[in-house]
Every structure is written in structure tokens, then in C-alpha cells.
Image (tube, grey):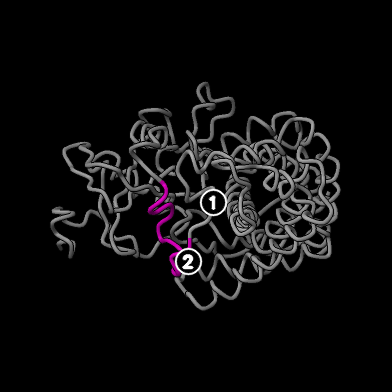
Amino acid sequence: MQHDAGAKCPFNEDFDAHADETFDSPHDLYRQLRDETPVAYSRGYEGFWALTRFEDVEAAARNADTFISSVRAVVPSDPRGIRRPPLNFDAPAHSPFRRALDRTLHHAGLERLEPLLRAHAERELQPFLDAGTGDICRTFGTIYPAYTAAEWLNLEHDEVARLASVSSEWVDAWRRQDGATVTARSEEMYGMARALVADRREYPRPIESDPASSLLSEEYEGAPLSDELVVGALRQSLVVGLVAPPILLGGICVHLARDPELQSRLRADLSLVPAALEEFIRLYTPYRGFARTVSEPVELHGRTIEPGVPVTLVYSSANRDERMFPDADEFILDRPNIARHLGFGRGRHRCVGMSLARLSLRIALETILARTTSIELAGAIEATRMPELGAQSVPLRVVAA
């Protein structure tokens, strides 16, 4: 099968991006691609390349001048073609947004958030424990990250349930490429972001602890960032912290359910959780569709990538590349080179909230382990689709401690 734009991509299709998948099957595919076709092509989602080896993904992520974000940053992309900062911006336009958000995620700020997040985790896990069973992704895994986002953005708590619901419906519609639902749910989140900007215009907060105020303090080319760009960046922030955590927490719980011995070991010594979390992030990295396009033709592994054709950086494959991580499909606590994992990306577009994400996930995992004596699978795992990889539904049966 040839790509319709044969001049752009003269290669046969290497894999079917729309093929049926299970929770585990994509890792089998990516292992094969890493060995046989490390620069692979699919006609799915209008056609895209996939880089699957660690070395290639890391190099592309670091080379933001050649592998640019302003054309396509995700496959599949927003069905309406909308682009928001900072994800869809290249430097130097990207820089003020990154600087503003980084400013609010310093160590002292995270220390302030820790007791708040722990209280949210304890409270929001309780209904799951009382029921003894449920879908960890669509319950605790959705509402707790919404509280994390709300604490960082200084949103009112009465907005959290709506944010969790709207963001879940938005991402499900994105996966289905349902433009009408994407637009409707996105507008609700835009409304939240506009209200946030209007409030901070009238009642500014310290820029070190409030993302909206920090963004409003920035300039680009001698002028303040426009309200619409600030709204777009906040809208992006509302979503980015709510898409990955349910999938990652689901993957972690699947792993724990399959490995009761590891459950017991971590429960007996919660000081092991930070190291375990890094290995879980490596194993269950939820992104395979973050993308770039090239600013000039790139030759890699005997293939030519032309400008205009999206190139996905398959972080979830790179993190299981045996060339970098021996016994890559195995959980190895204190893996010697675990700091090299690409769970939060690399380069200019590495995850701006990675420190907050680590804190939030650590608290979630510590709470789940401390408040249970047993975690078992209670039904079929529902796999997610592009641009994520992992589980979007994980039915569990738990025994409360």
C-alpha cells in the first residue's frame, strides 16, 4: 500500500495505526519496529512517521530547530486545527510561556502543595475503598489529578468535578476524532481559562505561585502576551495534567495486580515508592503521539523524512528500547540508568509540570498502597488509543487496610 502523497513518502506502510490493540500488544509491535524498521510509516491519521528507538527519539526531542512543533505537535491533531502555546509554539515565541509556567513550579511551591494533595488523595480514594471495587482510571484516577491541577492553578474547588468530567469527555472525543464534542468540551475549558484570566486581571496574585498571574506578567517582543494567548496556555494547562495521570495510574495498578509480591514489598517500605515510580513511568509512559515536523529533509536509517509529514516521538517505545534499558520489559527497582528515561520528554518541550506530576503520582501511589492490603484485577482492561498508550479503564477489586 502506497501513501497517497507518494512524492512525500515513497515507502510502503509499515504498521496499521488503527489496528485493534490490547493493553500489552503495542509493546510487541514497537519491539518489532525497533528491531526491523526504527523509522516506521503509517497511513493512519492522514499519514505519519514513528521514531521508536531511544537514541533517535531523544536526539529528535533535543533538536528543536530541525524537529519543530509549530506545524504538528500531536498525532492525531486537534480535529479543528487549533494550536495553543506553549506546546504548538517554537522558540523564541515558546520561551515566555515556558518561563512563566516554570516560575510557578519551584521547590518551595511544591512543598506548599504536598499536604494539600495528600488530603485530596486520602479523601478521594475513600469512596473506592468503601465500594471495594471500581474503575481506578475513571474514578480516583480522574478526580485526584483534577484537584492537583486546581491547586496549582488556584482554581476554586467547586470547579474540580466539572473540570474532571469535561476533560475526560474531551480526551475521549479527541481519540474518536469527534470534532463536535471536542469543540463543545473545549469551549467549556476555555470558559474556565477566560474566567481565570479575568479574575487575575482584577485581582493579581504572586507570580511565583499563580500561573495565570505569571503569564500575564510576561512579554514577547516588547509587548505583553495577549489575553487570548494566555487563555490558550491556561487551557492547555487544564488538560495536559489530566490526560496522562489516569492512564499512568491505570498501568501502575495493572502491574501491581499482576505482581502481588511487589505490592507487599512496596507496602512494607513506602520509602521505595519514589524509585518504583520512576520505573513505572518508564514502563507505562502514556505518550506515543507527541509529534514534530522537520524544517528540512532528514535522512535516518535509510529513509528520508520530508517537511510537512508528522513525525511521532514514541516515548513509550523509546523507554522500552533494550539498547538503552536491558531487560526493558521487566520492572527493575533502582535500575542503574533510570534517570535517562523519557517519560517526561526531553529538550525545550519536556513536560513543564514534571516535578508536580512526580509529586502528585507519588502521593497517589503511597496512598493506594497504604490504604489497601490487596489489589486485584476485576475485569477486562480497556486500552486507550492514539495519541496515548496504556489503559483508559482498569476495573479493580481492593481490600482496605
From the image, tell me which residue sits under label 1: 85
Task: Rate crowding at label 2 as few (under 14), some (14 to 19) or many (20 or more) other CA atoms within 10 Å.
Answer: some
Residue segment shown in magenta: 69-82
Q: Which residue is mark 2?
A: 175
Image quadrant where residue 115 sits: top right
Near-viewer residue (43 or 156): 156
Front-most of residues 324 and 373: 324
Image coordinates of residue 284 in percent, x first then y, are: 52, 45
Dot 1 or dot 2, earlier in sequence = 1
Lateral position of residue 358 relative to residue 19, left or right: right
Residue 315: x and y, percent?
A: 44, 42
Residue 283 at x, y = what percent? 51, 41
Residue at image coords 23%, 45%:
305
Q: Residue furthest front?
A: 222
Q: Identify the amino acid type marked 1.
A: Pro
Assess whether mark 2 and mark 1 are in contact (beta carbons under 8 angstroms).
no
- Secondary structure at badge 2 equals helix
Residue visible at 74% across and 29% down in the picture: 271
Q: Quadrant of residue 355?
A: top right
